[in-house]
Amino acid sequence: MSAHPILVLGASGSTGRRVASLLRAAGRPVRPASRRGEVRFDWTEPRTWPSTVTGVSRMYLMAPDGVPVDPAFVACAVDHGVRRFVLLSSKAIDVMGDERLMSAERTVRESGAEWTIVRSDWFDQNFDEGVFRDAVLAGEVALPLGDLRQVFVDADDIATVAVAALTEDGHAGLTYEVGGPRALSFGEALDIIGRAAGRRIVYRGTEREFVAAQTAAGLPHESATAAVAAFTALAGLGDAEPNDVVRRVTGREPKPFETYATEAAARGAWNV
Ligand SMILES: NC(=O)c1ccc[n+]([C@@H]2O[C@H](COP(=O)([O-])OP(=O)(O)OC[C@H]3O[C@@H](n4cnc5c(N)ncnc54)[C@H](OP(=O)(O)O)[C@@H]3O)[C@@H](O)[C@H]2O)c1
């Protein structure tokens, strides 16, 4: 087992926190990094990069929403001895025109190091830690996806796949589409959360309701309509289908959404 620490970017975030914790539980040395982390790393401050990557040979590579994976950072990591990247990406990025993540994938594929790409479906944790938390608490979530079904996936399962790719052989050069065990519409997912949390949460699934919610939240009309275009492209793919990636890579079944919701509610995730 290598004595080099495994670098975990976004180590305070939904996936990075879990990746770091699983690595520690497996007895692996970890270097957790973020702007406010043990190791100070900032995508926007290149002077923080060399000290972050020195002495590291493997890395969980993620950038927060809206932040590109700078090819200069990846080159800096390779120059300092990084030999394996496990990149967090997202499903359907090509169809949705997500240039940020397509470019991140190209960058690791062309890095000269080993790489594995983890293309995740929607995180379960969007509802209690991430982008939909405030809307869930407000009792109304708007997204222009109608009854489209998605395979929401638990961040624990994403992290377990990432840790396998970081620590085991046999995952290099592979792109894993990571999803949960069952396809659910946003309306169905919110009903499950509503029952677990004892809250009434209404799903607004039309384009008009989404744009109204976005503009009421102060976002520019153009960004709402650009998001509608991306979501319309996603909807064009039809309902998502579960696959066996989590089981194949980790040896265990992915967590059902109901279990996620029950556990989060029991933790008081939606108590305010
Ligand atoms: N949500 C979904 O359903 C979904 C699905 C597929 C893919 N994704 C992708 O997942 C990624 C987000 O992952 P996540 O949810 O695990 O992260 P997250 O919970 O949003 O956390 C972001 C992490 O990045 C760190 N960070 C923020 N700004 C930074 C900066 N300028 N430099 C360095 N670190 C910074 C934060 O810590 P500090 O504040 O301490 O810096 C935090 O640790 C995005 O790229 C998104 O596209 C999301």
Image: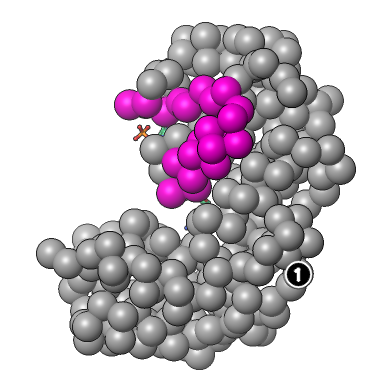
Total marks placed? 1
Whether 186 is drawn above or below 175: the answer is below
Does 195 appear above or below 42?
below
Q: Which residue is mark 1?
A: 244
Which region of the structure is painted magenta? 14-37
**The residue under label 1 is which amino acid type?**
Asp
The answer to whether residue 44 shows anywhere in this view is no
Left or right: 89 in relation to 15: right
Colour convention of the picture? one colour
Q: Residue at x 52, y 9 (%)?
A: 51
Q: Looking at the image, which is closer to me, 46 or 34? A: 34
| Quadrant in the picture for residue 205 | bottom left
Q: Locate the N terminus by quadrant.
A: top right
**Which residue is located at x 58 percent, y 49 percent?**
159
Residues 112 and 256: in front is 256
Is residue 165 in view from this perspective?
Answer: yes
Query: What is the quadrant of residue 97 in the picture?
Result: bottom right
**In the picture, residue 37 is in which quadrant?**
top left
Please rate how many residues cluster around mark 1, counting C-alpha atoms within 10 Å: few if below 14, some from 14 to 19, many from 20. Answer: some
Spot occupied by residue 70 in the image (x, y as percentages of width and height):
59, 29
Quarter that holds the C terminus = bottom left
**Spot occupied by residue 197 in the image (x, y as percentages of width and height):** 26, 78
Q: Is residue 27 left or right of residue 145?
A: right
Q: Is residue 21 above or below residue 120?
A: above
Q: Is residue 18 magenta?
A: yes
Which image quarter has ligand 1? top left
Q: Is 124 colored magenta in this rendering? A: no
